[in-house]
Image: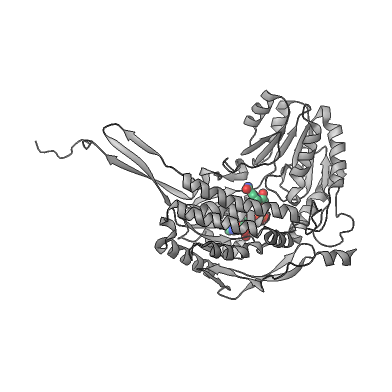
Amino acid sequence: MIAEKTQQHAQPENLPEAIRHYIGGRSVDSVDGSTFDVIDPVTNKPYIKAAAGKKADIDAAVAAAKKAFEEGPWPSMLPRERARVLNKIADIVETRGDRLAEMESYDSGLPITQALGQARRAAENFRFFADLIVAQHDDAFKVPGRQANYVNRKPIGVAGLITPWNTPFMLESWKLAPAIATGNTVVLKPAEFTPLSASLWAGIFEEAGLPEGVFNLVNGFGEDAGDALVKHPDVPLISFTGESGTGQLIFANAAPYLKGLSMELGGKSPAVVFDDADLETAINATVFGVFSLNGERCTAGSRILVQRGVYDEFVERYAAQAKRVRVGLPSDPKTEVGALVHPEHYEKVMGYVEIGKSEARLVAGGGRPEGFEEGNFVAPTVFADVSPEARIFQDEIFGPVVAITPFDTEEEALELANNTKYGLAAYIWTNDLKRAHNFSQAVDAGMVWLNSNNVRDLRTPFGGVKASGLGHEGGYRSIDFYTDQQAVHINLGEVHNPVFGKAD
Ligand code: NAD
């Protein structure tokens, strides 16, 4: 069985010899020549080397991006011209969807069908911001007879983009698309666990006609390349997605430079199932909500709060369904849960599975799935009767592990839902209209889905409250983050001011 699996787990063809930086339109090694090993999560064996960027590499990338911003055509091009390039990028991403998904799945362990979905989303992000900048209008204010005032929206400069490993290419697109759509130039620092798919960007951008120096990429570790980007004085903006702890550190490191910061951080989102909910749909959705993307999903509904009247039935049916979720090789189109990204992360998740066994009642999973003796495979794991003090209730596990907790009243449900440091998403399952809205509005979450899974509308705000983030992106909020709105005031009448030093 293992031999058969290894055969099916073939490395994608025609991989580059190594993953390099991309600076000022050229693919380059690190200034000091250093590299790091990238492993594949099914075997945990190194399969490619990536350039390990440090301060000198970031300096070179920022210098290239700054030059392109100050001297290049990109920031002052008409929105329509920039939108044409963005649409071409979307077209190319779409036509390379299969290749992209194959590389992403191999590198990250995400199931291939889900990686393909993420590739489509990446294309859609570029199309969406292409549309938005063409339709963009800015405020103008009239003070009759006295003033006309308007907003002169300007790109800011070099944007530093720092991304995590869970859906690498899509999350990179989520920052790249609005940053460049608005006329900025960028330095992207992708996650060190998953640098493979990011190596496709340079070719895509070149083919689409993005001017040299607008896009730059430096691979490497957070504490080296990421840190140097955060502390670079010529980078006025940092858009970061990652853990809340890393966000806190970046916030402190950016403070001396007074940078613009957008922080998309961790989550421990509740899915609240009232006893009047459509149980079948709620079970299907909450199974998908925590086990899709291997549970490595910031908006995962990883705490399910269930009203007492349907609690026992819910737990029983949920556990049975979780046991049927197909764990498999990431490359297999039938796979629903693949391999976790890295052995370090696997150890963390397995650590929580063990903690959970001492804190609550295990009703599904709880270890390695049968037949997967190596690699970062975790059986979909369900704990019931989880108390709010439990670590598996409070901490973000970021794997296929879910905590189910009973409640009696709506007040208790709200208290439980809000009882963590996080506030990213919430999912509410009820057919009571008033309760649905009142509960949604009261819950501490940046995003709420009512009788629905996480289905995004790209125009809506995206972001969290409390430890889940700072600032919102999504739709025109992304445009706001990546631009300065300069107010220009024009006097139309007499100059209005008291005259100082007037001659008598
Ligand atoms: P992480 O914080 O470890 O790393 C994220 C990125 O930050 C990586 O590129 C890393 O190299 C870099 N980094 C690390 N230390 C740094 C430093 N000192 N200075 C600058 N950069 C640094 O997060 P991760 O483990 O890659 O990702 C998982 C986390 O991301 C989870 O907490 C998840 O909830 C969160 N996430 C949030 C969202 C959201 O939109 N809210 C989306 C996806 C993932």
- In the rendered image, residue 261, in percent from the top left (x then y), is placed at 52, 50
The image shows a total of numbered marks equal to 0
Residue 60 in the image: above or below residue 412 = below
- In the rendered image, residue 272, in percent from the top left (x then y), is placed at 73, 34
What residue sits 46% from the left and 55% below the top? Answer: 81
What residue sits 81% from the left and 56% below the top? Answer: 377
Q: Residue furthest bottom?
A: 33
- In the rendered image, residue 94, in percent from the top left (x then y), is placed at 63, 56
- 290 relative position to 448: left or right: right
Residue 141 in the image: above or below residue 36 = above
* The C terminus - image quarter: top left
* Residue sitting nearer the eye, 67 or 332: 332
* Residue sitting nearer the eye, 167 or 358: 167
- In the rendered image, residue 450, in percent from the top left (x then y), is placed at 68, 33
What residue sits 71% from the left and 47% below the top? Answer: 396
Residue 172 sits in quarter:
bottom right
- 204 relative position to 106: left or right: left
Asked if residue 172 shows in the view, the reply is yes
